[in-house]
Amino acid sequence: MNRRTICRLAGTIVAAAVVASPAFAEEPFRIGSPSELSGKFVAFGAQVKKGVETAIEVWKSARGGKVAGRDIELVVRDTQSNPSVTVTVMNELMRNDKSDVMIGPGGSNTGAAAVTPWRQDKDHPIWIVPGVSTTVVEKEVGKDPYFFHTFAWTYHYHETNADAMKAAFGTNKKVAIIYSDGAYGRAHIEAARKYLKQAGFNIVGEELIRENAPDFTPSLFKIRMLHPDVIYTLVQTTDAVLLAKQIYSAKLNVPYLFGTAQAILPEWKNAVGNVQECWTGVATWMPGLTYAADKTEPKLFPSSADWEKMWRAKYNKEPEYMEVGAYVSTMLALLAVEKSKSTDRDKIRDAMVSQEYHTPLGDSKFEPSEISLHQAFGKMVVFQQQRQPDGKIASVIVYPQEAAQGKLQACKY
Amino acid sequence: MAGWGRVAVPAPLLTRFHPCALGFVDVMQLLPQVIVDSILLSGLYTLLAVGLSLGFGVTRIINFAHGEFVMLGAYGAFWLFTLFKVDPLISLPLIVVGGYFVGWLVFKIAVEKVLAAPHLNQILLMFGIHLVLQNIAVVLWTGDVRSAMPDYALSTWTFGDVFIIHGRLIAFAVATVMIGGLIGWLHFTESGRAVRAVSQNRDAAVLMGINPVRMYALSFAANSALAAATGVVVSFLINITPFMGFSILLKALAIVILGGLGSVIGTLVGAVILAFSETTVAYYVPEGSGWAEGIAFALIIAILVVRPRGIAGESKET
């Protein structure tokens, strides 16, 4: 081998190494997910993670491993259900991991903590939030064009609940509200008051309870004296478990028991057992809904029944509402990247806004909400835990009429 | 949901709690329930804190993992109930014995090594144990909320306007028996008297031939056993999660600081004061349930300012 050949060979090797180096390689499309993988809201984080992972898996099997010519990479970081850790996690996902799109978290407390670091980053990426109902977040993000909310805000809950109550038993009823002093209860109380009053209900009492308190009986004793027709609770799952048990024990004899989303969560249902009977709640999605498949993307967005079947076959369990939300959010992001053929946030944003699909969670059209610019899937269903002929208790959709599987029933004593 | 009975309440009361203008009639109407709830809560609070107080009185180490021993007891009762249908009251002796041995083990493996170490090292060690046990629980059982549901957890007696949840009454009875047993052990058995001797004067106890380290282990194990018993009782009263320990620890600390660290009688007094204060505020102060939990900390601050050694605590250098 002469000197010239050696030089050519060395040059080729150097050139190949340079071309193959990370600087020359196409950066992957990176989804960052701040999720509650530990701590008290671990149920939400686990749902978000599983929904995002499943969407990427389905995308890869339907479209191959890439989007817009880039590999898809998912970075999930644990917020530990802790607001201060959430701030760190958001900064890591944006600055170190260079996430192109963020999806998560699920809980209102962590969601509220995530806003400030996201806004402080002047090049903040597209942020899709498949959970978080507190309007504190909506107020904080304001009209930021890169924020997309794919879950209901608190006012969606109470507007839907008030409509359902009005449709079921008219407005000549007394309502007593129990709300927690944490972010969740505080975020819900204003909207609950507004829509219940607007619907014509008489709010006869309000009881503030301490989040994670070991005893709610003083509040229940006072409520018992008011003889309400409806107890309307605005508390998170942990408190909802104890509250359901103590309401049962306190013999309140109230015909209607309303909550928010906790009554659909397996965690709540498992913990309260038979006490769940008669409780009514509101959710963005639940098993048994009959949304049609999307005509252009049936593999990614099958009908809600087929999607549910896929999920049950894959995980041997019923899907949770936030799993559906995270799945659909991820899929919408991937479709937007494919459509825009870019990871540029403005192009992804424009594609997100312009696209519309029939998803297992409903129609994906993003529209302005009361404050923020991009809101989808605010439509909710009201369900009640009803005992079935076989003796088991099941979630039955009672509102809206077009989706109803049964009628709202008064609790039997 | 059969079995819910309507309780007759005079009509004029219907709107008095909103916006919470309490009159004399309302005060009297609530009073029996306030007294009943306070008494029942006092028993539970005493059981909750007495082990912590005993452990500190002897070893002079505050067991910051106390809440985690309660948590382990609660999970033990829950799993025995859920998997094998063993009623928490049946599983109580087993879990108390289990708690005793776990406490002994923790003492031998870790606490014994820091008996002569500076207080800061002891505090760090106990916080470390607290975190390790909490995280083990998360790994083993996830962060999901759980709750044992024996029939008596939900059934109730009503006497006029007063209602008593059976589960709370049972908890009170268990607490009374356990505390009675503890006092009996401390006063009428050789090992109990030896523990008290070490607590009162370690040097004199050594001169009497008592092995202090053995007594430390015994009191630490008794602390764990009592915490585990508390766990069994709360398994059907409150939510069980891996994170329940810290709030329990805070409550127990409030009680022992109030009553005086190391004093069993002081713990009883502290528990009664805290239970009555919290319950009264919860019933009589508007939005009082939200305020009641803060009472514990207000009392700690007050007692630290006015009488730092607590109500029945002794003023001595340790």
Image (cartoon, helix red, strand yellow):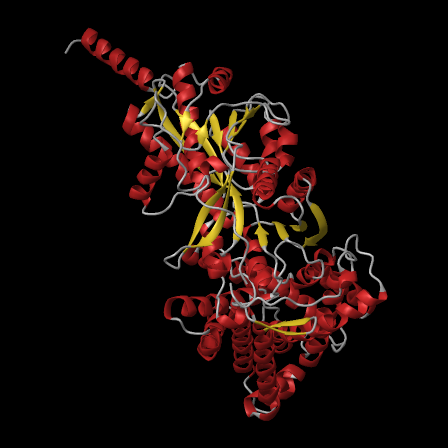
Q: Is residue A75 above or below residue A261?
A: above
Can see residue A329? no
- Residue drawn 82% across the image and 67% down it: B25
Q: Is residue A302 above or below residue B89?
A: above
Coordinates of residue A404 in the picture (x, y in percent):
46, 40
Q: Is residue A101 above or below residue B228?
A: above
- Residue drawn 69% across the image and 66% down it: B254
- Residue drawn 66% across the image and 49% down it: A173
Q: Is residue B217 above or below residue B185?
A: above
A195 or B87: nearer the eye? A195
A10 or A181: nearer the eye? A181
A90 or A65: nearer the eye? A65
Considering every residue shown, the one lying at the far top of the view is A4
Number of labelled discs?
0
From the image, which quarter does the C terminus of chain B lie in? bottom right
Can see residue A349? yes
Q: Would you say B44 lies left or right of A310 here?
A: right
Coordinates of residue B166 in the picture (x, y in percent):
57, 74
Coordinates of residue A293 in the picture (x, y in percent):
35, 28
Coordinates of residue A88 in the picture (x, y in percent):
56, 37
Q: Would you say A161 lies left or right of A308 here?
A: right
Considering every residue shown, the one lying at the far right of the view is B24
